[in-house]
Image (cartoon, rainbow, N blue to C red):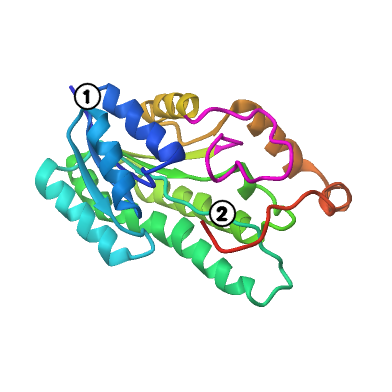
Amino acid sequence: MPQTVFITGASSGIGTAFAEHYARRGATLGLVARRADALASLAARLGTPAATFPLDVADTDAVRSAAEAFMAAHGVPDVVIANAGISVGTEGGAPEDVAVLERILRVNVVGLAATLQPFVAPMRARGSGRLVGIGSVSGVRGLPGAGAYCASKAAAMTLLESLRLDCHGTGVRVVTLSPGYIDTPMTRGNPYPMPFLMAPEKFAAKAAAAIERGTSYTVIPWQMGVAALALRALPNRLYDRLFARAPRKPRGLPL
């Protein structure tokens, strides 16, 4: 039976790849992103029922309204993917980057929570569903010039773990996906090598399989999971020596 899937950050990158993946399987989709034109264009070419909600996930009232409107029209979804996220380089000593940190946290953490929250009670009442959030291997350790992004992903993964415990035994599975380097607009400006770079379509297919299984936590590609475990195990003195002068993502305004 075709699924019903609600996806944020759907207008590009991983979000678009998820939308295309589930559309090929005949799913009814709820698509959220800031760019109304890009959402409309995506929905028009998917060939499956797709409701679009142009909004910023940092606007928690707008997210709730979209979730309620989608459920009123299509019922409680089978899968909700809180994918929307932003990234930009930051400098810990730059006063102006405090505002950048606040914006990144609003989207990557508060926006994730606001996306999943409206669906928790309805899914629990039904006794089934998948609540999916996007973490990152960047949340495993702090990287130079990326404090805001690393902090946001560490917070997101911890938030998802707590939600998983809150939903334990209810039939609702909380799935944390941690991408490595995926070839998206967010990563194309990175001025450093990106090992095991993966196409978003391949990521979406592997991620959808993990979602179907209800896997609590998975790193895609798996090689980056091994690398993240190795980095986590490094003593601070050695980690600092190896990474203090690593290339940094350019600073600026969040995408």
The overriding secondary structure of the stretch rendered in magenta is loop
* Residue closest to the eye, 46 or 231: 46
Please report the residue visible at 38 percent of the width from the left and 36 percent of the height from the top: 16
In the visual, does 40 lie left or right of 111?
Answer: left
Q: Disc 1 versus disc 2: distance between alpha carbons?
A: 32 Å
Residue 178 falls in which quadrant of the image? top right
> Of helix, strand and loop, which one carries label 2?
loop
Residue highlighted by disc 1: 26
- Amino acid tagged 1: Gly
Give the x, y percent position of residue 97. Answer: 63, 71
Residue highlighted by disc 2: 87
Please report the residue visible at 49 percent of the width from the left and 28 percent of the height from the top: 203
- Amino acid tagged 2: Ser
Magenta segment includes 196: yes
Direction left: furthest residue: 73
* Residue closest to the eye, 38 or 178: 38
The part of the chain drawn in magenta is 179-200
Give the x, y percent position of residue 1. Answer: 18, 22
- Badge 2: how crowded within 10 Å, few (<14), some, or many (20+)? many
* Residue closest to the eye, 167 or 184: 184
| Residue 129 visible in the shown view | no
In the visual, does 244 lie left or right of 142?
Answer: right
In the visual, does 151 lie left or right of 35?
Answer: right
